[in-house]
Amino acid sequence: MNIRIGNGYDIHRLGTGRPLILGGINIPHELGLLGHSDADVLVHAMMDAMLGALSLGDIGHYFPPTDDRWKGADSLDLLAQVDRLIKDKGWQIGNIDSTIIAERPKLKPYLPQMRDRLSAILKIEGDRIGIKATTNEKLGPTGREEGIAAYAVVLLTRS
């Protein structure tokens, strides 16, 4: 088989005293995502999709929250490591499609910056990375602004 598809999901609580980082971009907001690393749910969902496509587990296996090496880690650094892992196994990203779910702040103005940042880290063209943002229509934990979630799907091709 020369293609593999993986999907990923992540959600983190919002809280005070932390920056809001999504897609590697620091977004002005009074709340940030809480987590052991920088809690970038978009990047975490993408990494889980990449790992899942090759049956390599999830990011908790490689970067466990119980390991202080990853405390405050930049998720883009972790993404680069996951990308190296899949490349070492003979695979490359065909494309990624993703969705961020957040009531606030409005993310549309930041999506091109996120795509450009991720494109540079993954060394692929920006048009191979889809990032959308939506609300949850005030339903559930994201709708109540308790957290932000992200979904990602990745297509890997054999190099």
Image (cartoon, rainbow, N blue to C red):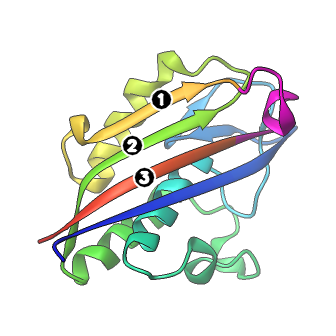
Label 2: which secondary element: strand
In the rendered image of this protein, does residue 109 appear above or below residue 75? above
**Mark-to-mark CA distance, 1 and 2:** 8 Å
Residue type pointed to by label 3 = Val
For the N terminus, the image quarter is bottom left
Q: Is residue 152 above or below residue 19?
A: below
Q: Is residue 61 above or below residue 39?
A: below
Disc 2 packing (10 Å; few <14; some 14–19; many ≥20): some
Question: Is the Cβ of the residue at disc 3 closer than 8 Å to that at disc 2?
Answer: yes
Q: Position of residue 104 (x, y in %)?
A: 73, 21
Spatial separation of the CA atoms under disc 1 and disc 3? 12 Å
* Residue 97 point in image, percent of width and height: 39, 43
Element at badge 1? strand
- Which of pointers 1 and 2 lies earlier in the amino acid sequence? 2
- Magenta stretch holds residue 142: yes
Tell whether position 133 is magenta. Answer: no
Q: Residue at x 24, y 42 (%)?
A: 128
| Span colored in magenta | 136-148
Would you say the residues marked 1 and 2 are in contact, meaning their CB atoms lie under 8 Å apart? yes
Residue drawn at (51%, 52%), measured in percent from left and top?
Answer: 43
**Quarter of the view holding residue 53:** bottom left
Amino acid type, callout 1: Lys
Q: Residue at x 58, y 36 (%)?
A: 100
* Foreground pick, 70 / 58: 58
Label 2 belongs to which residue?
97
Mark 3 falls on what kind of element? strand
Q: Is there a contact, CB below 8 Å, between mark 1 and mark 3?
A: no
- Judging by the rendered image, the residue that carries numbered circle 1 is 132
Percent x, y of residue 113: 40, 28
Query: Is 15 left, or right, of 2 in this rendering?
Result: right
Residue topped by disc 3? 153
Name the amino acid type tagged 2: Asp
